[in-house]
Amino acid sequence: MEKTSQYSVLSTQYSLSRLALTRILVSLLTHEEAIVAGIGNTNFDLAATGRRPQNFYMLGSMGLALPIALGGAVAQPERRFFALEGDGSLLMNLGCLATIASVAPRNLTIIIWDNGLYQITGKQHAATSSVTDLVGVAKAAGIANSAWAADEADFTRRLSQALITDGPHLIAAHVDDAPGAARPERDPVLLRDRYMRGIQKATSNE
Ligand SMILES: Cc1ncc(C[n+]2csc(CCOP(=O)(O)OP(=O)(O)O)c2C)c(N)n1
């Protein structure tokens, strides 16, 4: 079988709109929560939701959204942090799940967009498309509060719970492979400085 897109092979499984879920996430934030987006479509879609100084966009290096968000969550326990990562990028750095489980930051929520693909480099299939269940991996790493979101309503419900309860939380969703909706500025210094200013002010989770 020609393997052009996992979406075409398992269309019922990889059906949620990554952009719609990203919009739900941003719409639920009211306390200057930080969002750290991994490379690829994850940060392309976040950029499409509009300018937020508390958003950070990773460029170039896979698997760093979770470690960067973990550092922020430890440094600013009064602010909630969200890490957005693609399945391919998380597969490159699975060890960070064990680190997060060990540190157990109450203010960190991990969101995984699993399209079963390394999409932006040509839709090569990732292990998640066949054998690897990232929620199972996260639970085994020690992040007990890890779950798949079945649909938009379930995602909204789980996220709303994560916003008012102690983490770490992990929510994963089987998403589509629509092209990324926008692009952040490809300027690492600008992106870093804007984010550092955006999270300078202490905020409250209440
Ligand atoms: C160490 C390393 N290897 C390979 C790449 C090339 N690369 C950039 S994005 C990407 C795929 C990312 O997959 P995923 O995180 O699942 O996001 P998607 O493209 O599916 O949205 C790859 C392989 C890279 N940037 N760094």
Image: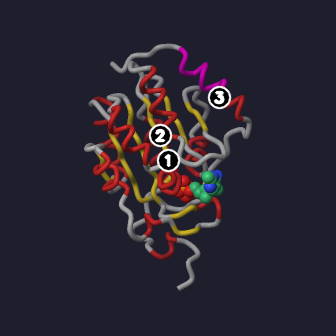
Question: In this rendering, would 44 be left or right of 176?
Answer: right
Q: Residue 194 in magenta?
A: yes
Is 137 or 76 nearer to us in this picture?
137
Of mark 3 and mark 2, the one earlier in the sequence is 2
Is 90 or 56 nearer to us in this picture?
90
> Which dot marks residue 66?
2
Q: Which residue is mark 1?
A: 85
Dot 1 falls on a residue whose secondary structure is strand
Q: How many neighbours does mark 2 have within 10 angstroms: few (below 14), some (14-19), or many (20 or more)?
A: many
Which quarter of the figure has residue 162? top left
Q: Is residue 179 visible?
A: no
Q: Is residue 24 visible?
A: yes
Q: Which residue is mark 3?
A: 192
Numbered disc in front, either 2 or 1? 2
* Mark 1 beta carbon near ligand 1 (under 8 Å): yes
Identify the residue shown where x is 57% and y is 21%. Answer: 198
Q: How many neighbours does mark 1 have within 10 angstroms: few (below 14), some (14-19), or many (20 or more)?
A: many
Amino acid bearing label 2: Leu
Bounds of the magenta segment: 193-200
Q: Against 203, is 18 above or below?
A: below
**Chief secondary structure of the magenta portion:** helix
The alpha-carbon separation of the residues under discs 2 and 1 comes to 7 Å
State which quarter of the image contains the C terminus.
Answer: top left
Q: How many neighbours does mark 3 have within 10 angstroms: few (below 14), some (14-19), or many (20 or more)?
A: some
Q: Against 115, is 201 above or below?
A: above
Callout 1–callout 3 Cβ contact below 8 Å: no
